[in-house]
Image (tube, rainbow, N blue to C red):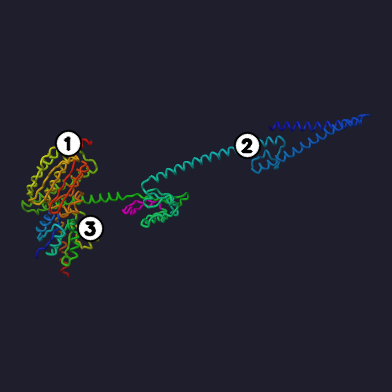
Amino acid sequence: MAEKRVLVVDDEIHIVHVVAIKLRNNGYEVMTAGDGAEAFKIACEEKPDIIVTDFQMPLMSGLELVEKLRGSEETREIPVIMLTARSFAIEDRQKEDLQISQCLSKPFSPKELLENIEDILYHRAVINRQV
Amino acid sequence: MRSVRNLYLIVTAVVAVSLLAGGLAEWLDSGAEEGGRFAGYMQRVPVASACCIVGAVGVIWLGWYWIKLARAITSIAKRLKADNIMDSRFRANGKPKASGNAIIDELSQVLTEALVRYSNVIGELERQVSDLQIQVQLTQRQKGHIEAIIYGIRDAVIVVDEYDKLLMANEAAGRLFNFDFTRSQHKPVGELVEPDKSEFVDILSHSRQSKTQATRKEIEFLKDQEPKTYDCIISCVYDRNRQVCGAVAVLHDITREKQIQQMKNDFISHVSHELKTPLASITAYSEMLADGEADDEQTIKEFCSVIQSQAKRLNRLIEDILNISRIESGLIKVEKKAVSLTILIEEQLQMIKGYAEEKNIEIIGQKPIVFDQVYADKDMISQVIVNLLSNAVKYTPAGGSVKIGTEVDETANLIRVSVTDTGVGIPEDAIEHVFDKFYRVGANKKQAKGTGLGLNLVKQIVEKVHEGRIFVTSKVGVGSTFGFELPLAMAEAIRT
C-alpha cells in the first residue's frame, strides 16, 4: 500500500518538526508549510490525503486556509485536522460548515494526533470502498 | 363687673320700690287731714304722684330687664344644648333648673370649662399645624437633597409619572437625549427622545407596565456620533396602595468598562495563546522522548535542546508579562540615579556581540560623548538597549549591519539613542502597532521568533517610568531605526 501523505502547516517550526517526525516514524510521507498561503499552494499541487494545520498563522489563518481548500475543486474533499491554542475560537457551526474533521487543543499529544489521523483516513477509506 | 351690675340692679330696685311706696303713702296721708285737706292735697299730690310714677317705671324696667335676661340665658342654654356642652346639672326637662345669678354663675362655670376645653383643642390644633409646618420644611429640604443628588450625579437620571410623562431629569439626561428639562417637564418621554434612542422609551414603558421593581438592560446609543453602551436600570415607583405611579431610569455609561473588559479578554486570550505555544512544543517533544521516538543520540539532543529553548521562551514571556503588568500598575520598584548611557550601551553591546557574529552581522558602536548622564533605573534602561539591539539583529539578514549612536540635544536638554539596522523593515500600516502588546509584524514573523512584548516593554520603561519618548522610522527592504530620548541628568536634577 502506498504511503499516506500528510501536509503539516504551522508557523512554529518546532511543532512542524515534531509532528513530521512522529508521522514519518509511523510510515507517513510528510510535507510541511509555514503559513496558509504556502499550504494552499502545496495542497493544490500535491493533493495530500490529510492536512494538519495550526489555527493562528500569519498571512493566512487556518480557517481561511480551510475556506480556500473547500472552495477549490481539487482540494474540496481533503480532510483537515485543526490544531489550536484557542479552543473557543472555532464554533461548532464553522467546524461543520467547513467540514473540519477534528479540532485538537494545544498543547497536544503527537500520539493522539496520530490516532486521529489514522481514524479519519480509515473511515475515509471505508467510505471510498463502499462508493 | 358682674358684682357692679348686681349692685346697680339692687340700688335701682330699692330706689324704685321706695319711691313707689313713699308716693302711695303720701297720697293716702293727704286724704286724712281735716280742713286744709284740699290745700295739702294740692301741695303734696304732685310729689307723691311723681314718686309713684318713677317707682312704677323703675319696677316695669326691672321686670323688662329680667325678662330680657331670662330670654338671653335661655337662648345661650339652647345653643349650649345644641353644642352638647351643657350637662344635666344645668338642665331640667330641657329648661334651666335654677334661675337668676345661680344660672349665670353656673353658666359662667360651664362657659369657662368650655373655654378651657376649646383652648386645649386650639392648642392641640396649633401644635399639629406647627408639626405639619416642620414636616413640610423637612420634606422640602429632603426634596432639595434629592434634587441636588439627581442633578449632581454624572449618570443620566429620568423620572416619569404613570403616563411616561417627564417629571424630573438631570443635565446628563438632557445631554444624552438632547432635551432641555425646564422646557420638557410633563411632556411624554417618547416625544422628547430621538428616534434612534426609542429602545430606551420601549424599555421604560415596558418596565413600568410590567410593575417589576427593577429592570436592568444594556442599551447601545450613538452619542456625538460615537457608539456608547449604557447600563440602564429602571425602578418602578409605588404609591400607598402599591400601585405603580411612575418610574426612575438611571443610565450609566459603561463604554469604557466594556472596552477595558474587551482589552482584558483580548490580553488573556493573547497571553494564553502565547503561553500555550512554547508549552505545546515542550509537551510534544517530551512525549516523543518518553515514547522512544528519538532513536539516536543526535535526535535526543535535538529534542532536549528544543525543550530547553522553549522553556526559556516561556520564562521570558512570563517575565515580560509580569514586568509590563508591574509597570502598568505602578508596583515596580524603580531605582533612579545618574548613569552614563555610553557605559550602559557598551555593556549591552558586549552581550549582543556573540549573537550578531553568529548571524554575520556587523555591529557599529557609538563614539563616546562628553556628557551622557541620565537620571534613570540602570537595569531598566539596560533592558531597553538590549531589546532594541537584539530586535535589530533578529530582523537583519546575514551580511547586514546594526548601528547604535547617541546624540545630545542641548536646547532640549535631552539625549537621544538610535539603533539603526539594514533589516527587513516594517510596512507603513504596521508601524503604528509595533509597540502594542503581542503585536508582531505578520510579514516578519517567519524571520524570527518573538513574544510581541519586547517593544511594548521598551515603550513602558521609556515613557511611563522615565517620562522619555520612543520613536521609530522604517522602510521595507531598507531597514529600521528604533530609538528613545531621555532627559539629561542635569536637566532632570533642575526639574526635580
Residue B76 on image: x %, y %: 68, 41
**Mark-to-mark CA distance, 2 and 3:** 95 Å
Q: Secondary structure at mark 3?
A: loop
Circle 1 sits on which residue?
B338
Foreground of the two, B59 or A120: B59
Q: Is residue B14 highlighted in magenta? A: no
Q: Amino acid at mark 3?
A: Ile
**Mark-to-mark CA distance, 2 and 1:** 99 Å
Q: Tell which residue pokes out farthest to the right in this image.
A: B35
Q: Chain of mark 3?
A: A
Checking the image for residue B113, the label placed there is 2
Q: Secondary structure at mark 2?
A: helix
Foreground of the two, A51 or B49: B49
Q: How many residues crowd around disc 1 within 10 Å: few (fewer than 14), some, or many (20 or more)?
A: some
Circle 3 sits on which residue?
A90
Sequence-wise first label, 2 or 1: 2
Answer yes or no: are tags 2 and 1 on the same subunit: yes
Q: Amino acid at mark 2?
A: Glu
Foreground of the two, B336 or B293: B336
Q: Is residue B40 left or right of residue B182?
A: right
Residue B292 on image: x %, y %: 9, 53
